[in-house]
Image: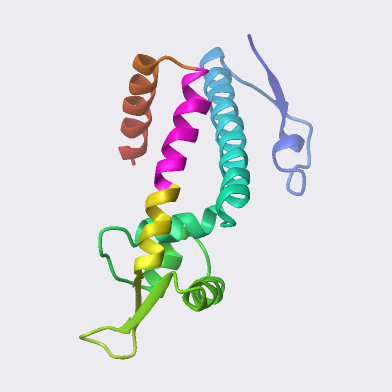
């Protein structure tokens, strides 16, 4: 199946002529693959996020932050912001709130006292354990109703390989 895309549809502010591009069958397949991946990801993220809010009164970003600090890890706030693709200011505010809720602890970096590092408190570690358990159950339930275990392993292997490329 061939699909036509006008140059104006791709870059309307830069297009001056109505030139048409034709996608090959393979190109169309990859576009549809990307669209399906994004749609699935968005649906799962919304459902998991809703469940975290309902059961734990925590957002997905809070769960991701707690997960980064699992197993006794200490990270600088800038590193956390980098890994969460967020600004330092936003993460600092979030860390401040989570610190006041006694989910996190802070310390100065041993080598550079200007750097503040964060880690999990006992309360934060316990919350993460509970959230991990629920997240695992929810994800398995949501996905296993759509793909078989063998297919899930194949998809995981394919996406891991795709994520390793360039």
**Where residue 41 appears, x then y in whole percent?**
55, 35
Q: Does the magenta stretch include residue 62?
A: no
**Where residue 141 appears, x then y in whole percent?**
49, 26
Which residue shows up at 70% across the image and 20% down it? Answer: 4
**Where residue 5 appears, x then y in whole percent?**
71, 26
Residue sitting at the far top:
1
Residue sitting at the far bottom:
113
Q: In which quarter of the image is residue 109?
A: bottom left
**Where residue 19 appears, x then y in whole percent?**
73, 29
Instruction: Report the magenta residues as a range.
Output: 132-146
In the image: residue 37, left or right of residue 2: left
Q: How many marks are shown on the rendered structure?
A: 0
Relative to 23, is 75 above or below?
below
Q: Quadrant of residue 133?
A: top left
Which residue shows up at 33% across the image and 33% down it? Answer: 160
Relative to 166, is 94 above or below?
below
Relative to 25, is 30 above or below?
below
Query: In which quadrant of the rendered image does the N terminus lie?
Result: top right
Q: Quadrant of residue 148?
A: top left
Q: Name the colour scheme.
A: rainbow
In the image: residue 78, left or right of residue 31: left
Query: In which quadrant of the rendered image does the C terminus lie?
Result: top left
Which residue shows up at 36% across the image and 61% down it? Answer: 125
Name the residue nearer the viewer: 121 or 147: 121
Which residue shows up at 56% across the image and 16% down it? Answer: 24
Name the residue nearer the viewer: 88 or 139: 139
- Prevalent SS, magenta region: helix
Name the residue nearer the viewer: 120 or 109: 120
């Amino acid at each position: 199946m061939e699909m036509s895309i006008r140059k104006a549809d791709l870059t309307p502010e830069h297009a001056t002529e109505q030139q048409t591009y034709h996608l090959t069958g393979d190109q169309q397949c990859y576009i549809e693959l990307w669209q399906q991946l994004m749609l699935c990801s968005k649906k799962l993220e919304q459902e998991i996020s809703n469940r975290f809010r309902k059961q734990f009164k925590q957002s997905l970003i809070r769960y991701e932050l707690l997960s980064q600090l699992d197993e006794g890890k200490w990270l600088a706030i800038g590193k956390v912001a980098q890994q969460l693709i967020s600004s330092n200011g936003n993460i600092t505010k979030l860390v401040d709130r989570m610190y006041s809720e006694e989910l996190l602890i802070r310390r100065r970096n041993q080598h550079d006292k200007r750097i503040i590092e964060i880690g999990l408190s006992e309360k934060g570690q316990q919350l993460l354990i509970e959230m991990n358990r629920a997240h695992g159950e929810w994800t398995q339930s949501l996905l296993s109703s759509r793909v078989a275990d063998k297919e899930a392993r194949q998809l995981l292997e394919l996406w891991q390989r795709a994520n390793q490329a360039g």
